[in-house]
Amino acid sequence: MPAALKKLEQLHFDNSFVNSLPADPESENFPRQVFSACYSRVVPTPVSNPQLLACVSEVAELLDLSALSCESELFTQTFSGNHLLPGMDAYASCYGGHQFGHWAGQLGDGRAINLGEVINAKGERWSLQLKGAGPTPYSRNADGLAVLRSSLREFLCSEAMFHLGVPTTRALSLITTGERVDRDILYNGNGAPEPGAVLCRVAPGFIRFGNFQLLASRADLGLLKALLDYTIRTDFPHLGEPSTPVYLAWFEEVCRSTAELMVHWMRVGFVHGVMNTDNMSVLGLTIDYGPYGWLEGYDPGWTPNITDAEMKRYRYGNQPQIASWNLARLADALLPLIESIEPLQQAISSYAATYEKGWRVMMRSKLGLIGEEEGDEPLTHELLMILPLVETDMSIFFRKLADIRSDSDPDQLSSDQLIAPLLDAYYDLGSLDSDYRNRFATWMRSYMLRIREQKISDADRRQQMNAVNPKYVLRNYLAQQAIDKAEAGDSSMIYELLELLRHPYDEQPENEHYAAKRPEWARNRAGCSMLSCSS
């Protein structure tokens, strides 16, 4: 670990994106279509009374910043958008995308402003981006602002995902603005002013599928090639100098990393909620935490997004298929540079192969199965058919499953005895009728016989299962409780949850209450069940 910098002014900005690619020639900040450019320079809108609510010390360390520097007034002024450090070159990126399956044309960073790219002492590149720092040329009819509610959700979730081992953007800081922002959270005409906030998110880069899509849709092939060449040279230098074969190798890598990301989402029960192509990172990161949610009752058909409540396009169980569809749209954008559809189709096939293999390995690890046997796939399939029959808490179920003992003869145990160790995972014990208990018992007998055959102790199996099945996730109601307290002026729960979620696989006996099932009061409350994109 290099010595932490003492001053924010010592950050080394490289800003290769703006230095390598063409800018919008218009300098005024008003909504417009932007052509022949990858970004528009724009300055964040000053706010009246910025107050630092939370900062993540580990992310500050990525930038070689000390914890002390994060407590400075300069830090608050900078990451609220009130001040640009020397070397910062603020801009909003231009891109398009498919939204809910339909081409939407130009979209762009409507409420995100990139401050610049920091090169740390290790030579790593970290892009700094403010969310909610005011309008940009891509804001259309919106204000470019964000509220505390949504900003806090992203702040907590991006860090929770990182510690779960899921590729993601990170969160550096959360700052309230001292201003109110009007929002209609349920789109029902009952809008109300909410506390404003600015989030600083950090990632190696923020290039999306939609950056390439917009240029291809406009037949701007020279700029499409320039953007792809830049992306490869900057983020994928191991592939070699850009060329047609390297373009294909790049797309194959994007396919594989996207597949691996989907496996992780499915493993932990995360539902993104709005998998539009403009919300897909070419780096295989989880980006743009909007109306996301976590499975509590296992339901492949659940979506947290009010806008998607009818179609359920972005439901939990459909995420791997949507990722494949999105990759096909990226392939469409690359076709003019490749000039042949077959190799692009082969790359998309690599997505399917990577996902299927990764999913099988992941499910065996969740079940504590060593090696691969012929009966493992039917065993897994039957469990996933059983889990949604009654409301079963996903996280609790798999943690409790790790405690099953393999030294008992399952044929000597009744259905009630076999289900007893899992009862804490069920929301309504009255729903466990005899048909369900018998079907579950049949599955449990097969499972216990399978783990009895393994040359591994129960303790070792439990340790391996608990390393992939988190005990603590950012349950929707926990995030809402932190929001309620923060809006009332109490930020203590933010740091409680940050610390809890740094160790999601550990038992943490003192925090057992955070692993409990969703309380009944949260079942249908806004923010605890479904959310809108309005924030």
Image (cartoon, helix red, strand yellow):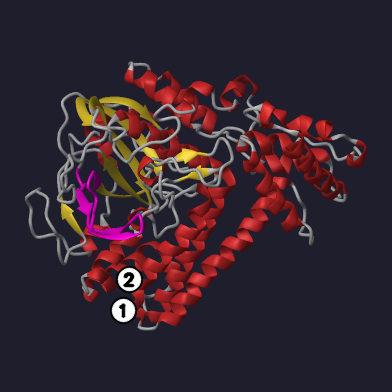
Q: Which one is in front, 427 or 62?
A: 427
Give the total number of marks visible in the rendering: 2
Residues in magenta, as a range: 86-114
Residue situated furthest bottom in the rendering = 340
Image position, residue 409 (x, y; %): 92, 40
Q: Position of residue 291 (x, y in %)?
A: 38, 40
Kind of residue sitting beneath label 2: Ala
Which residue is at a point 64% across and 41% down the rendered structure image?
389
Which residue was labeled with disc 1?
A: 336
Residue at 64 percent across and 44 percent down: it is 468
- The mark found on residue 443 in the picture is none
Residue 69 visible in rendering: no
Q: Which residue is mark 2?
A: 333
Residue at screen point 65% across, 22% down: 509
Which quadrant is the C terminus positioned in? Answer: top left
State the residue at coordinates (59%, 47%). 267
Relative horizontal placement of residue 82, taking residue 258 as reference (left or right): left
Q: Is residue 348 left or right of residue 7?
A: right
Tag 1 near tag 2, CB within 8 Å: yes
Residue 90 part of the magenta segment: yes
Q: Name the kind of residue labelled 1 in the image.
A: Pro
Quick check: is 159 in the magenta stretch? no
Give percent across and percent down for residue 435. 75, 39
Identify which residue, 276 or 463, lies in the foreground.
276
Q: Residue 530 placed where, x, y %? A: 42, 36
Q: Quadrant of residue 304?
A: top left
